[in-house]
Image: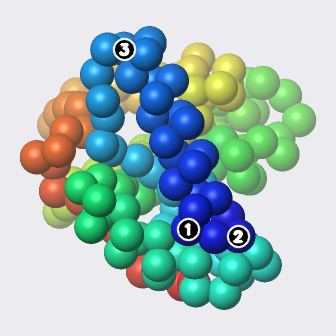
Amino acid sequence: YSSMDDFFNDLNSVSSRVERITNEKSMIIRFPGGSSNTVSKNYSKGIMTVLTDEVLKRGYHYFDWTSSVEDAGSCAKKSSATEKEDCVYNYFVKGLSKSRSNVVLMHDIKSYTANKVEDMIKYGIENGYSFDKITMETEQIHHKVNN
């Protein structure tokens, strides 16, 4: 985003659509690329510092993640669907920790990730983890803002 106005125009547009579809207003967001993204420097120096402060002032909660299944990164570069599925599953397993809350970044538009969700949940339950939705009461996970 090149400005705070551009970001909030986009957020308000998406929020309105979500509210029309679900009949609920969501105040929970994830920044594209996370709050730690450095790509934003190419568009507006310091924009993530401004946006992270402003969304909180406006009552939003934002979440980053503690681990990623790399479905938009290294796993996406694998040649076969099976290799991609194995890759996201392995990143999931390696990224979990019993010493913290786990927020795992994965993308529902990636079929190879969606195909492994059931296995991920099974692994988590079998290994003593629990799953829950993020709400306004959930402790926020924030990365270090780099711009």
> Dot 2 corresponds to which residue?
2
Q: Nearer the viewer, residue 36 or 69?
A: 36
**For the residues marked 3 and 2, what is the alpha-carbon distance in whole angstroms?**
30 Å
Is residue 95 visible to the viewer in this orientation of the structure? no
The residue drawn where x is 46% and y is 29% is 16
Label 2: few (<14), some (14–19) or many (≥20) C-alpha neighbours in 10 Å: few
Look at the numbered discs 3 and 1 and tell me whether their residues touch, using CB distance below 8 Å: no
Name the residue: 78% across, 78% down: 42
Q: Quadrant of residue 55?
A: bottom left
Mark 3 or mark 2: which comes first in sequence? 2
The figure's colour scheme reads: rainbow
The x, y position of residue 68, in whole percent, is: 51, 52
Q: Secondary structure at mark 1?
A: helix
Spatial CA span between label 1 and label 2: 7 Å
> Could you say whether the residue bearing mark 2 is in a helix, strand or loop?
loop
Specify whether residue 32 is in view.
yes
Picture layout, residue 23 above or below residue 104: above
Location of residue 75 (image quadrant)? top right
Q: Name the amino acid, label 2.
A: Ser
Q: Amino acid at mark 3?
A: Thr
Locate residue 103, reporting x and y percent: 34, 49
Which numbered marker is on residue 4?
Answer: 1
Give whichever of discs 3 and 1 has the lower sequence position.
1
- Look at label 1 and name its amino acid: Met
Dot 1 crowding, Cα within 10 Å, few <14, some 14–19, many 20+: some
Secondary structure beneath label 3 = helix
Q: Picture coordinates of residue 117 (x, y %)?
A: 47, 23
- The dot on residue 22 is 3
